[in-house]
Amino acid sequence: MSSFAHRFWQYQKERFPLGILLVTTSAVLLSTAAVLQGLGYPEIPWWKYAALGVAGLSFMLHTRIIDELRDKEVDDLHHPERPLQRGLITVQELTRLGYANGGIFISIHVALDPLSGVLSAGLLLYSIIARYEVGPLAWLKPRFWLYNLVMLFQMVLLQWIAYAALTQSVDWPNAIWSHGWGILALSAQLEVARKCLTPEEETSYRDSYSSRIGPKGSAVLVFLLTLAALFAFDSTGLPLNRGLLAAALGMLLAGLFLYGKNPIRRHSQLLQLSAVMAYVLCQMALWF
């Protein structure tokens, strides 16, 4: 078997696209800085934002691995082409990598601020419990919509913990809360767009949004989530760059139209790309 580094590089290309995540994470950090500056908070050193970027990516990789391990039996049956299923990487390797990234996440937050360290430990514990689907999570698992909403809620908690690290408080004005809700909506937008598949890619497990409400329905849902994010960002009371927002909606609508009209692989990929671009431009609308 080839080196772990080589195999992990292939794994991330398929299951954790680092290049795209670096772009989206950078966009979130810039919009966070814009909110804090717009609210008159003291200037925060750039290295703290960089550290939070590393922490955020570590947590997202941790949750990606949690998902892989939790869903292994289902994926063995319905997605045998995935890296874990075809033997590119092992359960033991993913487990060690997941815990290592969880440790990086907590360590950075503890170093930045004790309060955010405690909050990050709570979020990490929740994600680990979610792997084993005990208690209410076991009840949630077959409830597709509610289950995915609860899992996505980790993204807004991640954002608010980052704010705690930067402000050393959780006593915030409404703009910070609104920004967090906007990031939750955009995270959901990306998640739905990622699971807008072609008919040939659907499985009997129906773990995509397109399998639940069809290509047109899932395309409409992506658009509505983007509008919800814009409403939340507008609720911050901070100025938004209307040109960037218009560009974001224009590109997104083009991708949604093509996919909704003809859900072939190329159009599915264009929809996902347009969703990423809309995500980034909506964040940038707070900065520029």
Image (tube, helix red, strand yellow):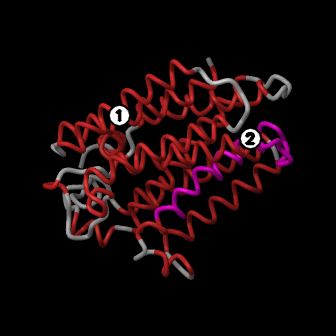
Element at label 1: helix
- Which residue shows up at 25% across the image and 44% down it? 2
- Mark 2 residue crowding within 10 angstroms, few (<14) / some (14–19) / many (20+): many
Of the two numbered discs 1 and 2 on the same chain, state the one appearing first in sequence: 2
The stretch drawn in magenta includes residue 152: yes
Give coordinates of residue 270: x percent, y percent.
27, 34
- Name above or below for residue 96 compared with residue 13: below
What type is the residue that disc 2 sits on? Ile
Residue 15 left/right relative to 280:
left
- Which residue shows up at 26% across the image and 61% down it? 211
What residue did someone put label 2 on?
176
Front residue of 86/272: it is 272
Q: In which quadrant of the rendered view does residue 9 lie?
A: top left
Residue 224 left/right relative to 83:
right
- Which residue shows up at 60% across the image and 35% down it? 53
- Mark 1 residue crowding within 10 angstroms, few (<14) / some (14–19) / many (20+): many
What type is the residue that disc 1 sits on? Leu
Residue 202 shows up from this direction: yes
Element at label 2: helix
Residue 202 left/right relative to 106:
left
Q: Residue 253 carries which label?
A: 1
Give coordinates of residue 98: x percent, y percent.
50, 55
Give coordinates of residue 112: x percent, y percent.
77, 40
- The count of marks equals 2
Quadrant placement of the C terminus = top right
Q: The magenta stretch spans which residues?
A: 148-175
Mark 1 → mark 2, Cα distance in angstroms: 28 Å
Front residue of 228/278: it is 228
Front residue of 263/171: it is 263
